[in-house]
Every structure is written in C-alpha cells, then in structure tokens.
Amino acid sequence: RGGPTPRATSSTPPRRPAPALADDGIPLVPTPPLAPSTIDPDGVRVFRLRARAGTTEFRPGVATPTCGYEGAYLGPTLRARRGETVRVEVVNELLQDTTLHWHGMELPGAADGGPHALIPSGGSSWPTWTVAQPAATLWYHPHPHGATTAQVLRGLAGAFLVDDPDGRGSPGLPDEYGVDDVPLLLQDQRLTADGRIDEETRTAIGPLGDVVLVNGVAGGCLPVTTTRVRLRVVNASPARVYALAAADGRDLVLVGTDGGLLAAPVPVRSVRLSPGERAEVVVALTPGERLGLVSLPPDLGLLPQLAGTYGAAGTLPLLELRAAAELRPSPDLPATTAVVPPADAASAGGERRFELSAGRINGRTPDPGRIDLRVPLGATEVWTVTSAHEQPHSFHPHGVRFRVLSVGGAAPPPELAGWKDTVYVPPRTPLRLLVRFDQPADERTPFMYHCHVLWHEDQGMMGQFVVDPET
Ligand code: C2O
Ligand code: CU
C-alpha cells in the first residue's frame, strides 16, 4: 500500500487570531473542530494532520510563535468507531523532527508513534491501525526523544475520541459534539515579556505556567445550551497536576477516565489529573446560571514544603460555564454507563517492579538500543510502580490499558477504579496495576513506559518493552 501523495509544503504559516469575545468582553473557549476524514476504497477512514509552525494571539496584538496540527495551535479532534481501520497521514512541516503518538490507543508498536518513529522535517508517515477498544477520550501528541516538552508546550496536541460501533456508544450521556459534549485541553503556560512561550523557566518537574489555557484560551467562558454538559478534560500540560472542581463546591459527576467509561456515574468533589490523564465529567446547570470550573490545590501526597515547587499551593481558574436563559432538557443520566469487569490479580501471569527515582527507572537511564522488558502477547501482569524518592511522577505505558489494583495497599478511589493508561504516582506509595498486553511491538518500534511529566520523560525517565507474539 502506498503512502500519502506528497504535497507541496503549504505556504503561509497559520495564524490564530485573538479569541472571539462574549458580550461582556470575556473570551469564548472554542471547541476544537472535528477533523474531516474520507473513506478510501478499502474502507479505511483517512485523516490528515499537518504539523505546522505559526503564530497565536494569546495577548491582544502579540503574535506568539506556536505550533499546531492543521492550524496555528493545538489540533482538530479525530473521531472513529471501534472496529474501523483508520489511517492518519501525518505531514511534518515543522523545521524540526517530530513523531505523533496516539496516547492511550491499543495499537501495534509499528503505528504507535513513539520516539523510534521519527518523522523528519519535511517528511511524512501514515500509521494505519484498527480501533480495538471501547469508547474513550484519547489524545495525540509528539514524542521525539528529548524534545517532547517543547513541542507539546508550543501547542502540538489534540483529542482523539473513540466511539462504540453502534453509535456514540454512551446512551443517556450527552453526545452532541460541540453542543453538550466538549473536549477541553488544559495547558498551563507562561509568556515571556516579548510574547514567546517560556520554555526555560523550570521547577524540578519542568515548566509550570502562570495561566491555564483551556483549548488555547485563558480566563474564557463556554456557552451552554442544554441542562447537562459533558466535558472531556485532557491534561495536556507538561507538568502541572490539576484537581478539577466546581468553584462553588458542588459535586461533578465523573463518568469516564483515560481508558473509557466507568461502570456508573459517580459524584466527586474534585478529580485529580496528572499530565496525560483524562476525565469525562457531566455538569448540570440551571437556565442563566454561571459556574466557574477551577483547579483546587491538588492532593499530591507531598511533603508540605514541596507543594510550592509543584505549583500545588493555590486555586487556579480554568473557565466559566455560562448557561443560556433557556436550556434544552438533557436526558437523565443513566444508572450504569459501561460494563467494567472486576480487576482480578489472580489472572496475572507475572509481576514486575518499577522504581522511579531522579531521571531513572529501576536505576537505568534510557537507551534506545536496549529493550528493558519482553512480554508475551496476550499476557496479563501485575506492575508495581513506586516513586522511590520525595518526588511524584505520572506513569504511562504505551499500547495498553490497565486497572489500578491498589494505591499504597488501599483500594483505588472512583477516579482510579476504571480503565486507565496513565496514573499519578505519589512519593513512596506503591501502585499495583493490572495490565494486559493485547498488541504486538517488536525491537524496531517497541512500546515505551515513562513518566508523563514531560520534562522527566525528556530527561530520561523512560524504558522500552516489546510484546512478543512468539513466546
Ligand atoms: Cu502521552 Cu509516551 O505518551
Ligand atoms: Cu516524573
């Protein structure tokens, strides 16, 4: 099968103007556009994503250099159903090498877009795979070794929604894209005096911004026209951990996490999201109501004197939900949302330990020529992940979804009880994960496991594994 037809490099760099404003001058939070797709003669759904450099007006009148897919900042939302084969023509129009990783997607290593799948500047790649997992909010971002922080911070990230084959896959949940079902990509950012994104000011976990952008807009509002709205929140920040909550203290209804819907909706005061994690929450509003969403100081399990280092000390505004004077009634939330089997460690064939410490996993720094683990295809294992020092991390293995068996010996809270692919790792607290390996990966394009604090990843908290059909 041939690749995408080479196209002439697009000429004018994309520019994103300052956001549109509500009547009172508050910027409107845009919904990322749905990526167009075509069906090729083999029935494959084909998307195209060009990584491009451009400028974005975060401050009125100031053109900040940014990157995006099919635009100046962030990327469109890809959407496909389980069972569909998809191909994404990825074109690298940046002046530097990149890769494109499908975070949370269960797919073979050859399509995973990890650091081995480098797309040179001016080059392209066309990963193809069959979507084989339940409805979920996934995302995509670059993964070039050592340069992931800078590329993501400049805006290379987007959402990928997986639907069940029989439709949107979530009866009773709001599912009209851009109306009552909206992805929200969170990225914190700091601009330098001359209007560039500050990549140099770092704490121990990398760059922490002074504002939080939601879909690229700080201090924005999202108009709501229905009595319930479903927000698919993606922590696309390099380092910051959020505790998503309503400003007035009401509960949010959590319906899904990284790898799909929970068994049943569960009211929660706040949802902690470390880099790479996602949460789907449903918020009920009354006509005319305005409700702020904020990030509370997250419970990080840190020594108290470290809270400042992690930006965990104060409450940060995210956006304001603004209900219209008249709202279309949404259906009641369903009592159950998905079948989530109990996580049973007895099904595991083996056990492995991962000790995270400064720049290392199990004492090793990464070596692209070394395979750290081999796992037989179809195996189920218990992975025990521990931060062996006073710093927290965010652990993410590629190509799999997992379940959390326990956190420091205790049963997981609701936000960790469903399917996950990324998890916050508090200091000195072992997490036991039940992982099944259903996708193959060989030595040429192995899967990664790493800290999703992108600066730690860039510094080498990463290992690689193959999933072997032979054994
Ligand atoms: Cu979201 Cu290896 O990454
Ligand atoms: Cu880390």
Image (cartoon, grey):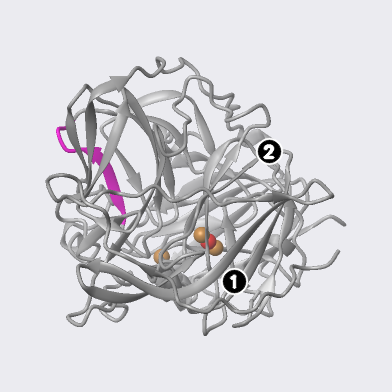
Residue receiving disc 1: 99
Q: Position of residue 266 (x, y in %)?
A: 38, 25
Q: Secondary structure at mark 1?
A: loop
Question: In the rendering, which numbered label is found on residue 382?
Answer: none
21 to the left or right of 180: left
Depth check, front residue: 153 or 387: 153
Question: In the rendering, which numbered label is found on residue 82?
Answer: 2
Q: Is residue 49 above or below residue 120?
A: above
Q: What are the residue bounds of the magenta stretch?
A: 241-249
Depth check, front residue: 178 or 416: 178
Identity of the amino acid at label 1?
Thr
Q: Quadrant of residue 103?
A: bottom right
Graded by Cα atoms within 10 Å as few (under 14), some (14 to 19) or many (20 or more), the crowding at tag 2 reads some
Q: Position of residue 215 (x, y in %)?
A: 35, 54
Q: Secondary structure at mark 2?
A: loop
Identity of the amino acid at label 2?
Arg
Q: Residue at x 83, y 67 (%)?
A: 2
